[in-house]
Amino acid sequence: MPREILKGLHGEENWGTLKIGIKSTMQRETKRTHFRRFLEADLAHLEELESDPEIMRFTSFQVPQTKEATKQRLLELTQNPEKEKPPFGVWGAFLKEDESFVGWLMLSRKRSSDPELGFMLVKKAWGQGFATEVSQGILKEAFREKTLQKVIATTALENTASIRVLEKLGFKRKESADPKLLSFQATRDSIR
């Protein structure tokens, strides 16, 4: 897949433009990955995530999604991808070396005035540090926004892998209104 990264002012990891045929989408790079807005051609990637019971058990859905539900979700993600300006929004993450799909990440203000970090990885990417790597990349960019004070995250009590990632990133636990969830928050100074 042809790519062109436009170098910016902030060092190696920069927003650039990914050109795919006649479409362009904003992208971000980390050491091993790049992430970009979802395209209609990404349906199989999203289905790989959303049809797997092990992956979905810790999401708000808690169960695998039908193909039709995943199509609808992709449609929502592709219809107005720039609604949230980078680094905010939902992003597909891909390996630089071979364009393999790693998963998705989000930084969104949909449920709160504070942006919420979320991530979901395909099984073959589990245990390799990708959740930490892509989250660090997007958080680093988000905290360049001078007015941003904190980022929040929530996860299920049993989701030990996500808890470890959030703690490794520098998130601190805070009181949760839902007894089944753990809530976290991070500030510019706590992010590692």
Image: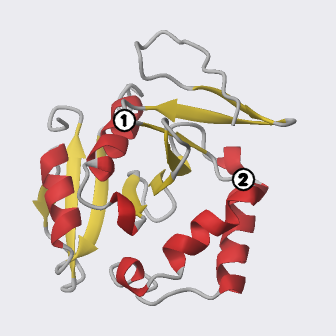
Horizontal and vertical percent position of residue 155? 26, 71
Quadrant position of residue 118: bottom left
Horizontal and vertical percent position of residue 62? 40, 87
Using the rendered image of the protein, determine whether residue 148 is visible from the camera's viewpoint: no
Tag of residue 137: 1
Where disc 2 sits, the SS reads loop
In this rendering, is residue 56 above or below 42?
Answer: below
**Horizontal arrangement in the rendering, residue 27 relative to residue 63 (left or right):** right
Q: Earlier in the sequence, mark 1 or mark 2?
A: 2
Quadrant position of residue 180: bottom left
Where disc 1 sits, the SS reads helix
Quadrant that contains the C terminus: top left
Q: CA distance from mark 1 to mark 2?
A: 21 Å
- The residue labelled by disc 2 is 39
Three-letter amino acid code of the residue under disc 2: Leu
Residue drawn at 49 percent across, 22 percent down: 14
Q: Nearer the viewer, residue 126 or 168?
A: 126
Q: Nearer the viewer, residue 137 or 98?
A: 98
Horizontal and vertical percent position of residue 106? 47, 54
User: Label 1: how many residues lie within 10 Å, few (<14), some (14-19) or many (20+)?
Assistant: many
Q: Nearer the viewer, residue 20 or 117?
A: 20
Report how many numbered discs are placed on residues in the image. Answer: 2
In this rendering, is residue 146 above or below 135?
Answer: above
**Horizontal arrangement in the rendering, residue 165 relative to residue 95 (left or right):** left
Using the rendered image of the protein, determine whether residue 125 is visible from the camera's viewpoint: yes
Q: Nearer the viewer, residue 50 or 137?
A: 50
Colour theme: secondary structure
User: Label 2: how many residues lie within 10 Å, few (<14), some (14-19) or many (20+)?
Assistant: some
**Horizontal arrangement in the rendering, residue 30 relative to residue 68 (left or right):** left
**Horizontal arrangement in the rendering, residue 67 relative to residue 55 (left or right):** right
Residue drawn at 32 percent across, 48 percent down: 130
